[in-house]
């Protein structure tokens, strides 16, 4: 893939390919992610000394609920991995969708640079661990939007059966979801996952809600 909570205080030919890979010094392990932990800072301020005056409550969301899709990139032993979290704000449980080879073995990963290989579209190792996160862009949805987008994600998971590094890769998978949501996306799916997610945020000027949600006066929490 060339072209990514603590309320109290914050995935006969093989031998030849393997030999070529090993001879060039590339060590690939699709199942093992590694990276430097990324520190997240809470958006809630802390006050020392006297108790501060209570802040006015935030306006209620007109949608009746807060749902989101979080486009994410994380480190991996190869190029990194792009995937999404989605669900309802305020809930610890999250859904994960991301395209990757259907096994932890290195062999399908190598073959996947030449031809399509069987794929899985759920979570992979490291997807739920914040220490591997390298980029994140969260967009909030109205209730009606969430129903449509989440159904699209489930449908895409059920119908995406193969992975290929150059064409049907993890970046292309989440790019289709972003386009369905009406977001502008980078022109290439061959970017590193981290670069792709950061570029996605820039193209959409860091917008926190979809265009239709913004028009409806939907309120979201900054992230």
Image: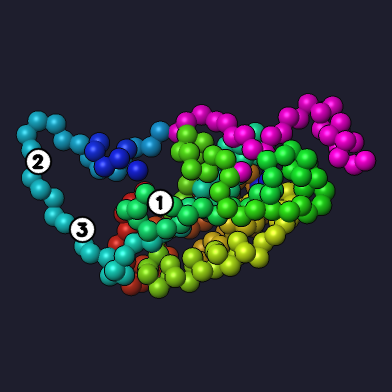
| Residue 5 locus on image (x, y percent) | 35, 43
- 67 relative to 48 in the view: left or right: right
Q: Closer to the observer: label 3 or label 1?
A: 1
Residue identifier under label 2: 52
Residue shown at the point (51%, 36%) measured from the top left: 132
Sort mark 3 into few (<14), some (14-19) or many (20+) by Cα contacts within 10 Å: few
Q: Give whichever of discs 2 and 1 has the lower sequence position.
A: 2
Residue situated furthest right in the rendering: 12
Write the residue at 59% across / 34% down. Answer: 33
Q: CA distance from mark 3 to mark 2?
A: 17 Å
Mark 1 neighbour density, 10 Å: few (under 14) some (14–19) many (20 or more): few
Asked whether disc 3 touches disc 2, contact meaning CB atoms under 8 Å apart, the reply is: no
Q: Which mark is residue 58?
A: 3
Residue holding disc 1: 93
Query: Residue at the location (82% across, 48% down)?
Result: 114
Instruction: Name the element at disc 3.
Output: loop
Most common SS among magenta residues = loop
Q: Is residue 114 above or below residue 29?
A: below
Q: Earlier in the sequence, mark 3 or mark 2?
A: 2
Left or right of 157? Residue 94 is left
Disc 2 to disc 1, C-alpha distance: 32 Å
Disc 3 to disc 1, C-alpha distance: 24 Å
The quarter of the picture where residue 111 lies is: top right
Depth check, front residue: 151 or 40:
151
**Rendering colour mode:** rainbow
Residue 67, compared with residue 170, is above or below; it is: below
**Residue 57: percent from the left, percent from the top?**
16, 56
Residue 142 belongs to the span the image colors magenta: no
Query: Magenta span covers which residues?
Result: 11-38
Which residue is more in the foreground, 177 or 5?
Answer: 5
């Amino acid at each position: 893939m060339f072209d990514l909570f603590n309320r109290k205080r914050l995935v006969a030919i093989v031998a030849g390919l393997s030999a070529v890979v090993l001879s060039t010094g590339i060590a690939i392990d699709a199942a093992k992610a590694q990276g430097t932990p990324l520190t997240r800072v809470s958006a809630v301020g802390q006050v020392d000394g006297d108790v501060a005056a209570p802040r006015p409550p935030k306006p209620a969301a007109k949608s009746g609920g807060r749902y989101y899709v979080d486009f994410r990139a994380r480190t991996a032993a190869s190029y990194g991995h792009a995937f999404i979290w989605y669900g309802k704000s305020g809930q610890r449980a999250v859904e994960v969708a991301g395209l990757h080879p259907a096994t932890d073995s290195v062999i399908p990963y190598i073959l996947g640079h030449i031809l399509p290989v069987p794929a899985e579209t759920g979570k992979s190792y490291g997807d739920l661990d914040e220490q591997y996160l390298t980029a994140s862009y969260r967009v909030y949805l109205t209730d009606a939007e969430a129903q449509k987008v989440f159904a699209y994600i489930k449908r895409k998971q059920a119908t995406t059966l193969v992975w290929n590094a150059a064409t049907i890769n993890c970046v292309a998978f989440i790019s289709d979801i972003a386009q369905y949501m009406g977001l502008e996306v980078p022109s290439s799916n061959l970017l590193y996952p981290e670069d792709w997610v950061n570029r996605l945020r820039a193209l959409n000027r860091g917008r926190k809600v979809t265009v239709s949600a913004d028009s409806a006066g939907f309120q979201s929490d900054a992230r």
